Image (cartoon, helix red, strand yellow):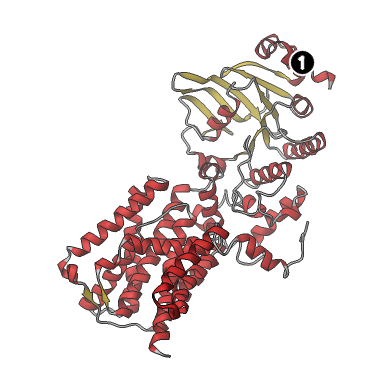
């Protein structure tokens, strides 16, 4: 495999994982603009574990997911008291706090960045990405999947139907944070260098964009969104510096034509219709 | 009025919104299999009474008892586990779920919250949760809508889906907020027959309804509210002659109570 191809595939795998980190809270009706904070927490935690204690990078990455998930669980208590635009602002603030904290932590290099000794290649990262996709697919095939949608559709009715609105929202936020931490750790171990300056709110917005443009109604939307966001700029390389202009125009066009995102339940139903007889067991 | 042990009991329940007393010392009892109508002019507090029973709002004073158990302090989501299910005046189905997914929401009411969440209800098309929901939908004549999104369905169908959703919680008390509103006479008759079956299975039913023909045919007892107070409680046949009820509805509207004329 050429270095270029491997680099693109690694980014594709990491972006797919990141997309699911954003997907979980979005499905629960939460606009999380602090994902970069969880990514950074996972990246630095995993790097620190392997640099300082010689923890193998795969183990360190899993520990980083748990670490980011724990942070998510703890901050979800104050953050999820807010709704809508206020939740977006509160998560944005959380991301800023994480970034500022790392800048002041000299034990991980502060503003100078942090080199990461242990390397993981595409094989490991791709396997983790497949595992995340499979795990999210399984999770959304359970009652959790319909319950979390119910909660974001109508909190009051969901509550009266016996669903634990707060518990489900916390779970979605926490699992999203854990997945973000995993993505951060894998990035750190592949690119061997991390710096706090990368984990800005713009980073969070990009991830949220993958998901919104891919579509939030099915679990395939985030995958498609991540793939398009990773691959399209590469395909457009021929047109040099104009490629991001073309890319932005394509995003605008997609938003105009498919405001629900590229992949919708309706689309999936139409694709499946050929396989299934109409009006089963009516 | 009911000789049997009450399945649902309200004991001197009151609720204020600011300075306005919307429910004032409301007490009534409903026995298993009983069908009771809660009626009253607009703003009388009928839907508020439902919201207090289900816990959507906390009561200011008084008690709500379900099969003898005091549920007044229970949060709304736990009351359904004690056997209290409802439908809504303005249909509240989940827009991004299919019909079968909507009714499956309440199906795990009586299992542990955590294990229920991990039941793979959508992993294979044939599983026991889907089959149970499909059977109940089919029994209600809704089988062919199972995988449809709820938004595109006709109003009457959506109301039936809401009823199935409430029934899948295996309730002992069913609160129906205007179940016949917006239905044509044929649909109303079908609804009544279906509810009679539900009631025969032992479920106590309380309906808030304006359709007096439906109430006359379905309910044996009527509780009349006005400005949050119970002004009458009597057999359905007697309500149209009740002086305080006539007074509350005033003039021409009292014609609506000529159940006998129906």
Quarter of the image where the N terminus of chain B is located = top right
| Residue B197, percent from left and from top | 76, 39
- Number of marks in picture: 1
| Residue B23, percent from left and from top | 53, 21
Q: Nearer the viewer, residue B28 or B4?
A: B28
Q: Nearer the viewer, residue B255 or B12?
A: B255
Q: Which residue is mark 1?
A: B255
- Image-based side of B19 in relation to A146, left or right: left
Q: Residue at 74% across / 21% down in the picture?
A: B236
As drawn, A56 above or below B33? below
| Residue A90, percent from left and from top | 33, 50
Can you tell which quarter of the image residue A49 is in? bottom left
Q: Residue at 50% across / 62% down in the picture?
A: A213
Label 1 marks a residue whose chain is: B
Name the secondary structure under disc 1. helix
Can residue A127 be seen here? The reply is no
Sort mark 1 into few (<14), some (14-19) or many (20+) by Cα contacts within 10 Å: few
As drawn, A250 above or below B29? below
Q: Residue at 54% across / 53% down in the picture?
A: A149
Q: Outermost residue, right direction?
A: B261
Q: Residue at 66% across / 53% down in the picture?
A: B149
Can residue B219 be seen here? The reply is yes
Q: Outermost residue, left direction?
A: A106
| Residue A93, percent from left and from top | 30, 53
As drawn, B64 above or below B96? above
Quarter of the image where the C terminus of chain B is located = top right
């Amino acid at each position: 495999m050429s270095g270029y191809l491997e680099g693109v595939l690694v980014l594709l795998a990491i972006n797919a994982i990141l997309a699911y980190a954003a997907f979980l809270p979005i499905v629960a009706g939460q606009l999380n603009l602090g994902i970069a904070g969880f990514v950074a927490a996972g990246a630095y935690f995993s790097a620190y574990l392997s640099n300082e204690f010689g923890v193998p990078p795969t183990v360190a990455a899993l520990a980083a997911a748990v670490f980011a998930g724990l942070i998510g669980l703890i901050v979800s208590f104050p953050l999820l008291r807010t709704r809508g635009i206020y939740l977006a602002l509160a998560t944005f603030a959380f991301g800023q706090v994480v970034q500022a904290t790392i800048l002041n932590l000299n034990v991980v290099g502060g503003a100078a960045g942090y080199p990461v000794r242990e390397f993981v290649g595409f094989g490991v990262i791709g396997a983790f990405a497949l595992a995340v996709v499979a795990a999210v697919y399984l999770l959304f095939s359970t009652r959790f999947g319909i319950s979390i949608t119910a909660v974001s559709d109508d909190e009051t009715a969901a509550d009266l139907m016996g669903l634990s609105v707060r518990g489900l929202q916390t779970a979605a936020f926490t699992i999203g944070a854990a997945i973000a931490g995993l993505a951060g750790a894998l990035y750190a171990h592949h690119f061997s260098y991390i710096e706090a300056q990368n984990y800005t709110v713009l980073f969070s917005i990009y991830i949220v964009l993958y998901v919104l443009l891919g579509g939030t109604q099915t679990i395939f939307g985030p995958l498609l969104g991540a793939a398009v966001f990773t691959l399209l700029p590469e395909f457009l390389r021929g047109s040099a510096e104009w490629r991001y202009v073309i890319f932005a125009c394509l995003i605008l066009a997609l938003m105009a034509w498919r405001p629900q995102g590229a992949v919708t339940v309706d689309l999936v139903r139409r694709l499946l219709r050929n396989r299934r007889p109409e009006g089963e067991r009516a | 009025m009911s000789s049997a042990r009450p399945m649902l009991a309200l004991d001197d329940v009151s609720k204020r919104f600011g300075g306005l007393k919307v429910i004032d010392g409301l007490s009534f009892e409903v026995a298993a299999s009983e069908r009771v109508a809660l009626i009253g002019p607009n703003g009388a507090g009928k839907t508020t009474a439902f919201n207090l029973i289900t816990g959507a709002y906390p009561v200011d004073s008084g008690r709500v008892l379900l099969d003898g158990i005091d549920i007044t302090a229970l949060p709304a989501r736990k009351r359904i586990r004690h056997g209290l299910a409802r439908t809504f005046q303005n249909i509240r189905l989940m827009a991004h779920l299919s019909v079968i997914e909507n009714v499956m929401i309440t199906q795990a009411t009586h299992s542990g919250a955590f294990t229920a969440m991990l039941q793979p209800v959508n992993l294979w098309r044939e599983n026991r949760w889907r089959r149970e929901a499909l059977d109940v939908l089919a029994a209600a004549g809704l089988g062919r809508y199972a995988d449809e999104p709820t938004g595109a369905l006709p109003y009457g169908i959506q109301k039936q889906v809401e009823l199935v959703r409430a029934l899948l919680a295996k309730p002992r008390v069913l609160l129906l907020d205007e179940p016949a509103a917006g239905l044509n006479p044929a649909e109303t008759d079908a609804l009544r027959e279906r509810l009679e079956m539900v009631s025969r299975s032992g479920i106590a039913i309380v309906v808030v309804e304006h359709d007096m023909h439906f109430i006359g045919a379905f309910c044996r007892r009527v509780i009349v509210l006005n400005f949050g107070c119970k002004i009458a409680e009597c057999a359905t046949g007697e309500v149209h002659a009740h002086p305080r009820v006539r007074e509350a509805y005033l003039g021409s509207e009292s014609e609506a109570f000529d159940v006998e004329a129906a």
